[in-house]
């Protein structure tokens, strides 16, 4: 694999490389055709207003306090001993804080999340982190250090970050592509646990709503899943990646395992993020709920070693936004993505590129899976050989995506990057480009499918 300029890509993550090429081609294609980016999880809903207001409020208070100090000191700005001592007395310098976060922000977040999960959550159960990724990395480190050969049970397709070599995760996969509607079931979970009889399970890791599939497990199945989990050792942590839980399409709020089975709470580690739901990826705000004192202590220590703590202003802003995240705001956000997902699903059906399982129903996130296997066997564009090396024919989902990238200025992601067989020809499409953007994207894919048929 190669980067633009012919540099070897080495072990760069597949999605990141695809994104590098998409950006390169966006500004270097002879026809100056607009690149449609639908390969990464890119929120496009308006930035959450409560974050912006709270952050502005936080900093305005410092602006006002600084002004007061300045006015007071301006009487004798002479660097005298008195001036120095007055400055110390009125200092507005921002000091280091606690690794898990400031008590006031944790308490505000705990109240908001207690309401969300309908479970008592205390400030002591809350840890702010610089994005959910940082928390996942810390969790994997702690879990795998204890048992380097232990397994983490997780469904496939999975979020690629779970499988980065750096984590040393020994993933034991539950193939949900075999399951009704590509959803995790208690039965499939039980089967995968049985397969590991006599071996160590380090953790369970569930992403619900699922990235990349867009499915939601649902309350009934979660109850059954809880029963299965209860048959396993109480020492095994259960990680719930709920990065998309604000983005479910039902008028009812997402139901979590924490709400369904609070008796498991000592094992649960719940990850929430401002990235998607509040349209604030770049601010790196996330929060974790952990009820287990020992694990929490380890996570707090890891936080202290890594970045000491998250910025205090962001804890303030994020906790205020969640305290104000009323059902109406959640509904508006969800409807915005739902209409785009529905359009994409409809268009895929019309061009016979829908996934083969008729029970597949997207109930959350902004992702849609598509079956582009009709493009397997088509000629591989000569230009794209600068990425993947010499090849004449499209044989994998990755080839499909690079072929669309070079031929049609469309960036979508191969499902093999999420752990699925590359020869299936499945892809993940992010639906956040708006109605015109999605129609344009689908037109280009449809056109390519028509051309493939004529070969
Ligand atoms: C399933 C899942 N978990 C976690 C994350 C990471 O979120 P953050 O931006 O808070 O690090 C993402 C981001 O795309 C995600 O899709």
Image: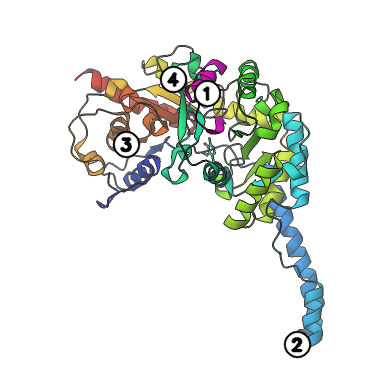
Give me the disc on residue 405.
Answer: 3
Q: Residues within 10 Å of mark 3 (few under 14, many from 20)?
A: many
Give the label on residue 78, or none: 2
Residue indicated by mark 4: 177
Q: Nearer the viewer, residue 408 or 265?
A: 265
Q: Are marks 3 and 4 in contact (CB under 8 Å)?
A: no
Magenta span of residues: 186-213
- Residue 360 appears at what percent x and percent y? 48, 16
Q: Are marks 2 and 1 in contact (CB under 8 Å)?
A: no
Separation of residues labelled 2 and 4 (CA atoms): 73 Å
Residue 347 seen anywhere in this rendered image of the structure: yes
Q: Which residue is mark 1?
A: 193
Q: Classify residue 358 as left or right of residue 267.
A: left
Single out the residue that lies furthest toward the top. Answer: 358
Q: Earlier in the sequence, mark 3 or mark 4?
A: 4
Q: Residues within 10 Å of mark 2 (few under 14, many from 20)?
A: few
| Cα distance between the residues tagged 3 and 1 | 40 Å
């Amino acid at each position: 694999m190669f980067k633009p300029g012919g540099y070897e890509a080495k072990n760069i993550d597949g999605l990141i490389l695809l994104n590098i090429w998409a950006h390169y081609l966006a500004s270097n294609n002879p026809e100056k055709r607009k690149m449609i980016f639908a390969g990464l999880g890119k929120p496009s809903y308006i930035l959450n207003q409560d974050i912006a207001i709270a952050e502005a409020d936080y900093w305005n208070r410092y602006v006002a306090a600084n002004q007061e100090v300045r006015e007071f000191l301006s009487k004798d700005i002479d660097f005298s001993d008195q001036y120095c001592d007055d400055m110390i007395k009125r200092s507005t310098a921002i000091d280091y804080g606690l690794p898990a976060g400031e008590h006031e922000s944790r308490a505000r977040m705990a109240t908001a999340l207690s309401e969300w999960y309908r479970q008592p959550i205390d400030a002591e159960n809350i840890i702010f982190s610089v994005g959910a990724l940082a928390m996942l990395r810390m969790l994997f480190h702690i879990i795998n250090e204890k048992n380097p050969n232990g397994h983490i049970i997780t469904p496939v397709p999975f979020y690629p970050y779970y499988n980065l070599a750096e984590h040393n995760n020994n993933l034991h996969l539950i193939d949900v592509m075999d399951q009704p509607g590509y959803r995790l079931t208690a039965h499939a979970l039980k089967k995968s646990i049985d397969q590991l009889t006599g071996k160590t399970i380090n953790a369970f890791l569930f992403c619900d709503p699922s990235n990349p599939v867009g499915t939601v497990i649902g309350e009934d199945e979660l109850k059954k899943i809880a029963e299965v989990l209860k048959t396993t050792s109480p020492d095994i942590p259960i990680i719930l990646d709920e990065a998309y839980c604000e983005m479910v399409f039902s008028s009812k709020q997402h139901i979590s395992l924490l709400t369904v089975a609070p008796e498991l709470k000592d094992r649960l580690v719940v990850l929430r993020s401002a990235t998607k739901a509040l349209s604030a990826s770049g601010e790196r705000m996330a929060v974790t709920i952990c009820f287990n004192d020992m694990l929490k202590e380890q996570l707090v220590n890891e936080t202290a070693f890594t970045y000491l703590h998250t910025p205090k202003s962001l804890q303030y802003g994020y906790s205020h936004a969640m305290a104000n995240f009323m059902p109406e705001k959640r509904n508006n956000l969800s409807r915005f993505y739902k209409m785009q997902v529905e359009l994409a699903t409809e268009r895929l059906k019309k061009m016979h590129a829908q996934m083969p399982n008729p029970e597949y129903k997207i109930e959350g996130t902004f992702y849609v899976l598509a079956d582009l296997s009709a493009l397997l066997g088509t000629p591989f564009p000569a230009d794209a050989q600068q990425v993947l090396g010499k090849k004449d024919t499209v044989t994998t989902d990755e080839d499909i995506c690079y072929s669309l990238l070079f031929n049609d200025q469309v960036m979508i992601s191969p499902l093999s990057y999420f752990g699925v067989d590359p020869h299936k020809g499945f892809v993940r499409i992010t639906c956040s480009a708006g109605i015109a953007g999605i129609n344009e994207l689908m037109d280009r894919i449809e056109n390519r499918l028509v051309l493939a048929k004529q070969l």
